[in-house]
Image (spheres, helix red, strand yellow):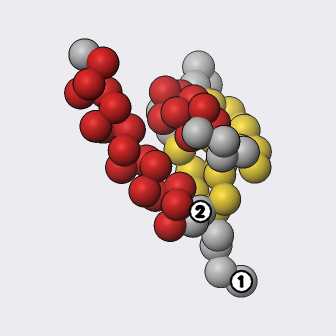
Amino acid sequence: MINDTIVITQERMAGWLMFNRFHKVDEKPDLKDSNRKIFIFKDSPKLRETMGKYSQFKEVIS
């Protein structure tokens, strides 16, 4: 089976994706750090493109 999901470890990136209308598939505790969560999204070229735009967005607002 082809893995069609992507794991996001940064809460801000996950928030950016959700702000841009991507729905998370799941949210789980991070096994490496119990204070953090991982966010799972369905992977797609559009999602990757939006992730790339996040760094441009951060530069504009800082």
Inspect the image, locate mark 1, and give the three-letter code of the amino acid beneath it. Met
> Closer to the observer: label 1 or label 2?
2
Q: Quadrant of the C terminus?
A: top left
Q: For numbered disc 2, what is the local secondary structure? A: loop
Q: Residues within 10 Å of mark 1 (few under 14, many from 20)?
A: few
Residue 3: x and y in percent read 64, 73
* Residue 32 visible in image: no
* Residue 4 visible in image: yes
Q: Which residue is mark 1?
A: 1
- Residue sitting at the far right: 26
Above or below residue 32? Residue 48 is: below
Camera-nearest residue between 25 and 62: 62
Residue 48: x and y in percent read 46, 58
Please give the name of the residue rendered at 60% of the width and 32% of the height, measured from the top-left corner. Answer: 19
Q: Earlier in the sequence, mark 1 or mark 2?
A: 1
Q: CA distance from mark 1 to mark 2?
A: 14 Å
Camera-nearest residue between 55 and 5: 55
Q: Which residue is mark 2?
A: 43
Res 26 quadrant in image: top right
Res 42 quadrant in image: bottom right
- Residue sitting at the far bottom: 1
Residue 22: x and y in percent read 66, 46
Q: Quadrant of the N terminus?
A: bottom right
Please give the name of the residue rendered at 43% of the width and 56% of the height, measured from the top-left corner. Answer: 49
Q: For numbered disc 1, what is the local secondary structure? A: loop
Above or below residue 12? Residue 25 is: below
